[in-house]
Image (spheres, rainbow, N blue to C red):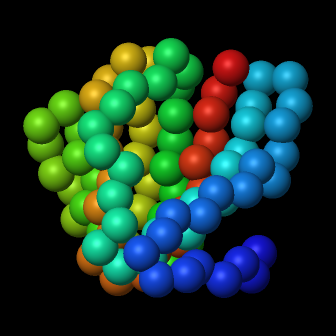
Amino acid sequence: MTTEIAPDSIVSRTIYSGAGLKVIWFGFAPGQELSEHTSTHEVVIHVLAGSGVIGLDGDEIAAGPGTLVRMDPRLPHSVVATTELRLLLYMLN
């Protein structure tokens, strides 16, 4: 997926939504972040390009291309882009 990421922005696009699974593409400009939040669903983050830090209930994971992170429902998490960051988020229903 080729989507422009404007400076100081976060872009998201749902690329699949079906029974039991929703896939969302995210693009972060450098320095952008999703502050800590939770989800009622199990979630998997797959980093496609760039680098960032994924916060998981107080722990931090340095993330780069190929990083996969699985989260239980209601786990506090956050994402901070250190460079332009592109990832897929898989939400399991």
Work out whether 4 lies above or below 45: below
- Given residues 72 and 31, the one toward you in this image is 31
Q: In this view, does 79 lie to the left or right of 61?
A: right
Q: Which residue is drawn at 32% across and 24% down?
A: 75
Q: Is residue 30 left or right of residue 62?
A: right
Q: How many labels does the image show?
A: 0
Q: Is residue 86 left or right of residue 17?
A: left
Residue 42 x %, y %: 52, 25
- Given residues 49 and 32, the one toward you in this image is 32
Quarter of the image with the N terminus is bottom right
Residue 92 quadrant: top right
> Can residue 20 be seen in the rendering of this structure?
yes
Work out whether 72 lies above or below 51: above
Residue located farthest toward the right when viewing the structure as drawn: 18
Q: Residue at x 72, y 56 (%)?
A: 13
Residue 54 x %, y %: 29, 53
Quarter of the image with the C terminus is top right
Q: Residue at x 42, y 75 (%)?
A: 8
- Given residues 14 and 72, the one toward you in this image is 14
Q: Which residue is drawn at 62% across and 34% down?
A: 91
Residue 64 x %, y %: 37, 73
> Can residue 66 be seen in the rendering of this structure?
no
Residue 78 x %, y %: 31, 45
Work out whether 38 lies above or below 31: above
